[in-house]
Image: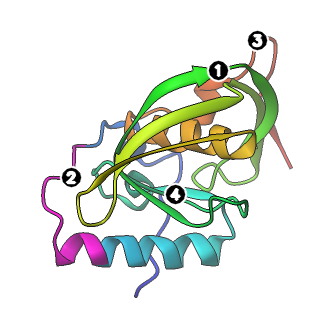
């Protein structure tokens, strides 16, 4: 597989809405492999296809918990509960951080690499990551989700 360039905040593609995946073909398999390699190299916990310039509703997540590595195609959150205010960063906004307000628990549905629908749920960091990555699919970055009274800071 290949490493892809992660787009940063100056790139207008990050503000665009991604389109659903309709073809579960070899191109999708290559994209998923490239995204996995890119995420590992960047040492991140999640990556949306739009972050590498591909406007498709594809997300990968690996927060190192019991969920393991996950591929979410055409994902949608179907239930949220609770609240968490935590520090958040993004591979597309390097060295920027801020406290966001996200649900503590989420349940979502998505398709796997073959097109089969599944549901999953999670809490804490996993829930925050799901919300963060799905926001990317709608052209939203974490700085637009800062908790009330919070600001972005740089390290």
Q: Looking at the image, is mark 3 or mark 2 earlier in the sequence?
A: 2
Please say if 43 is above or below 77: below
Tell me the number on the disc at residue 81: 1
User: 127 and 97: which one is in front?
Assistant: 127
Disc ID at residue 148: 3
Q: In the structure shown, which secondary structural element does the residue marked by tag 1 occupy?
A: strand
Residue at horizontal 51%, vertical 24%?
79
Residue 74 locus on image (x, y percent):
30, 45
Residue 61 position within the rendered picture, expressed as x and y whole percent measured from the top left: 56, 58
Disc 3 or 1, which lies upstream in sequence?
1
Dot 2 and dot 4 residues touching (CB under 8 Å): no
Q: Nearer the viewer, mark 3 or mark 2?
A: 2
Q: Assess disc 4: are there few (<14), some (14-19) or many (≥20) residues with their C-alpha within 10 Å of its C-alpha.
A: many
Percent of width and height locating residue 83: 74, 20
Labels 3, 1: front one: 1
Q: Within 10 Å of the Cα at label 3, are there few (<14), some (14-19), or many (20+) other Cα atoms?
A: few
Numbered disc 3: secondary structure: loop
Looking at this view, name the residue that lies furthest to the top: 148
> Residue 13: image x %, image y %?
35, 46
Callout 3 touching callout 4 (CB < 8 Å): no
For the magenta stretch, what is the residue range? 19-29
Question: Could you say which quadrant of the image residue 87 lies in?
Answer: top right
């Amino acid at each position: 597989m290949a490493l892809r360039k992660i787009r940063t905040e100056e790139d207008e593609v990050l503000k665009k809405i991604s389109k659903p995946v309709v073809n579960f073909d070899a191109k999708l398999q290559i994209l998923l492999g490239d995204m996995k390699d890119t995420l590992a190299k960047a040492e991140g916990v999640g990556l949306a296809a739009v972050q590498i310039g591909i406007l498709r509703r594809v997300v990968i997540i690996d927060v190192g918990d019991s969920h393991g590595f996950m591929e979410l195609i055409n994902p949608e959150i179907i239930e949220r509960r609770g609240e968490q205010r935590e520090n958040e960063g993004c591979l597309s906004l390097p060295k920027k951080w801020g406290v966001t307000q996200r649900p503590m628990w989420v349940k979502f549905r998505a398709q796997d690499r073959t097109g089969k629908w599944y549901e999953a749920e999670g809490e804490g960091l996993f829930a925050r990551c799901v919300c963060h990555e799905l926001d990317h699919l709608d052209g939203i970055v974490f700085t637009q989700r800062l908790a009330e009274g919070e600001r972005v800071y740089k390290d």
